[in-house]
Amino acid sequence: MTAKTWDRKDLLGLQELSASEIETILDAAVIFKSSSKISSALSGSTAAFLFSEPSTRTRSSFEVAARRLGAEVLGFSVASSSLLKGESLLDTLRNLEAMGVDYFILRHEHSGVLESLAPNTRASLINAGDGAHEHPTQALLDLFTLREKKKTLKGLKVVIVGDILHSRVARSNIHGLKKLGARVTVCGPSALIPGDIEKLGVAASHDLDAALKGADAVNVLRLQLERQNQNLITSLSDYFESYGLTPARLAAAPGCVVLHPGPINRGVEISSQAADGPNSLILEQVKNGVAVRMAVLSLIGQWRKRNA
Ligand code: CP
C-alpha cells in the first residue's frame, strides 16, 4: 500500500484532522476496497473492543477489518468485565495493554472520554462513538461513499436531517464535509437542533421540503430516544409527517442520494421505500465501512511501526 504518511497514534475525531489527513484515509480506503481482501499490515498486533453501548455495524466491521489486516482480536466484553466492580477505564486499558493489546476501539456514552485516556497509554485509541461528540469512522465512510458516487465533495449540498442534538454522526459529518468543501444544511424540529449549530458553518432549517431543494445528498439520522430525558417531539407519527424521508419528498431533489448510518427505524425517520429505493446508498455505506476501517487501522499501524 502506498498511502501518504499518517502522523497520529490515535483517531479521536474529525474536528482535529486536516482535509489532507481525511483524504489520506479515504485514498487508502480506495486501495483496500479494490485490492485483495487479506493483508498482513497488522500481523503480530492485537486489537480489543471496549463498547459500553450497543453496536452492530461499527463493532462488526472493525472486527472484520482488523482480521483482514492480520491482527489478533480480543473478545472483551464490558458487561462481564471488572469495570462493573469499579475499575477505571484507564486502569482497564493499562491492564489490557500489559497483555499486549496495541489497538483499542472504544464506544462510550460520555462525550470526550477518549481525550484524557489517549496520552496515558502507548496503545492506539480509535473512537467508535463517544456520547454526542464524534463518530469519526462513520463520517469517514459517509464521506467515502459520497465521494465515490459524486466524484468530489467540493460544492455538494448535503442535508443532514433528524436528531442533530444528540448525534455524534452529525458532528463528525459536519467537520468532515466542511473540510472537504461541501455545503451542509441541518434540518429537524427546533428542539433537536442545537441553538449554536450555525457556528459550525452550517445552515439550519426546520422545513425538510425546503432544505431538500437542490440537495445532492441527504443523510437521515435516527431519533436517539435513549439519550432524550424529556419529550422533545410530540409523537413519532407527527415526526414522520414532518421529517420522514419518502420517495415523494425525494422527487423534489433529482439525483439526491440517501445515506443513513443505521440502525434504521423504518416509518419514523425514513420510509422503507426511501431506505430501499434506487437512490439509497445505505448498504454501500456498510460495505465501505470495512475498507475505511482497514485504512484507519493500517495507517495507524504504519505510525506505530515508525514510532516503535
Ligand atoms: N452507525 C453505527 O454506529 O451503527 P452501530 O451502532 O450498529 O455500530
Image (spheres, helix red, strand yellow):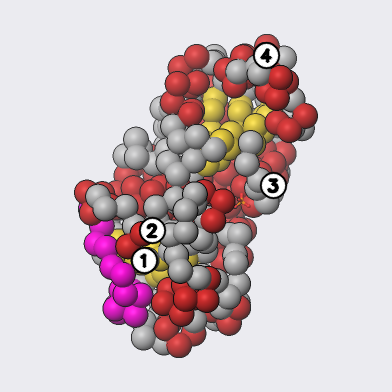
Q: Secondary structure at mark 3?
A: helix
Quick check: 54 left or right of 223? Answer: right
Image location of residue 22, percent across then percent down:
39, 44
Q: Mark 1 is on which residue type?
A: Pro
Quick check: 104 left or right of 300? Answer: right
Labels in figure, total: 4
Q: Secondary structure at mark 1?
A: loop
Residue at mark 2 to residue at mark 1: CA–CA distance: 5 Å
Q: Earlier in the sequence, mark 1 or mark 4?
A: 4
Residue 253 visible, this angle: yes
Which of the numbered marks, if any, corresponds to residue 128? Answer: none
Residue at mark 4 to residue at mark 3: CA–CA distance: 24 Å
Q: Which residue is mark 2?
A: 192
Residue at mark 2 to residue at mark 3: CA–CA distance: 29 Å
Q: Viewer-proximal residue, 108 or 1?
A: 108
Q: Residue at x 50, y 70 (%)?
A: 235
Q: Which residue is mark 1?
A: 189
Q: Mark 4 is on which residue type?
A: Asn
Determine if the C-beta at disc 1 is less than 8 A from ligand 1. no
Residue at mark 1 to residue at mark 4: CA–CA distance: 45 Å
Residue 149 visible, this angle: no
Q: Mark 2 is on which residue type?
A: Leu
Q: Which residue is mark 4?
A: 95
Looking at the rendered image, the disc whose residue lies closer to the viewer, 2 or 3, is: 2
Q: Where is 168 relative to 299, above or below?
A: below
Determine if the C-beta at disc 3 is less than 8 A from ligand 1. yes
Q: Earlier in the sequence, mark 4 or mark 3?
A: 3
Q: Earlier in the sequence, mark 1 or mark 3?
A: 3
